[in-house]
Amino acid sequence: MRRNFTQLYVHLVWATWDRLPLITPEIQEPIYNVIAYECEQMGCRLVAIGGIEDHVHVLAGFPPNLAISDLVKQIKGSSSHCTNHQIKPDAFFKWQGSYGAFTVNLQELEGVAAYIKNQAKHHRQNTQRPNWELASPSVASPNK
């Protein structure tokens, strides 16, 4: 092999401030567009994005020279700034400081993408995967 080959995928999830229902239907698509743009700018391939009023999930392929923490910082910072200054400047919008990151192998990619794209349905039917929803601090940390 003459050059590096990687298939790196990450499932990210983070919530709004205090899990408030801040992602209203009118701003959901513009926020997702900012997230997609930032992923592209960071050299990532967005596979899926979805969420509900109080959190968002992102599935992306990422380059080996990009730290996941840098990716999340850029996405969250840019989407929050854009929401507060352009999308809905007259309303309060803020992300929580924490996030969850889960590696995804190629064989699981379609299933994880489908889960993310169907967030509203999973929450309506109570079929969420608790370890991907960050319902409590003990879920977020595999060491607890």
Image (cartoon, rainbow, N blue to C red):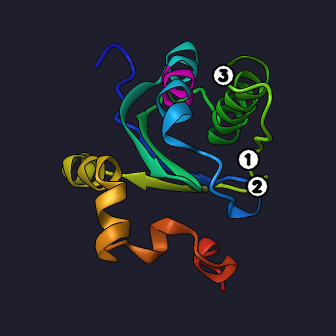
What main secondary structure does the magenta stretch of the protein show?
Answer: helix
Estimate the x, y position of residue 44 in percent, counting from the top left: 47, 24
Q: Identify the element where label 3 is drawn.
A: helix
Please, what is the three-letter code of the amino acid marked with disc 1?
A: Trp
- In primary-sequence order, the first of circles 2 and 3 is 2
Residue designated by label 3? 87
Q: Which residue sits at x=49%, y=16%?
A: 40
Categorize mark 3 by other alpha carbons within 10 Å: few (<14), some (14-19), many (20+): some
Q: Looking at the image, is 119 positioned above or below residue 67? A: below
Residue drawn at (32%, 13%) of the image: 2
Residue position for label 1: 95
Task: Look at the numbered discs 1 and 3 and tell me whether their residues touch, using CB distance below 8 Å.
Answer: no
* Left or right relative to 129: residue 40: right
Highlighted magenta segment, given as a residue range: 31-36
Q: Residue 96 placed where, x, y %?
A: 76, 54
Q: Quadrant of the C terminus?
A: bottom right
Give the CA separation, mark 1 to mark 3.
15 Å
Q: Please state which amino acid type lies under the numbered disc 3.
A: Ile
Q: Distance from label 1 to label 2 (Cα)?
A: 5 Å
Q: Quarter holding the N terminus? A: top left
Q: Is residue 57 left or right of residue 19?
A: left
- Residue corresponding to mark 2: 17
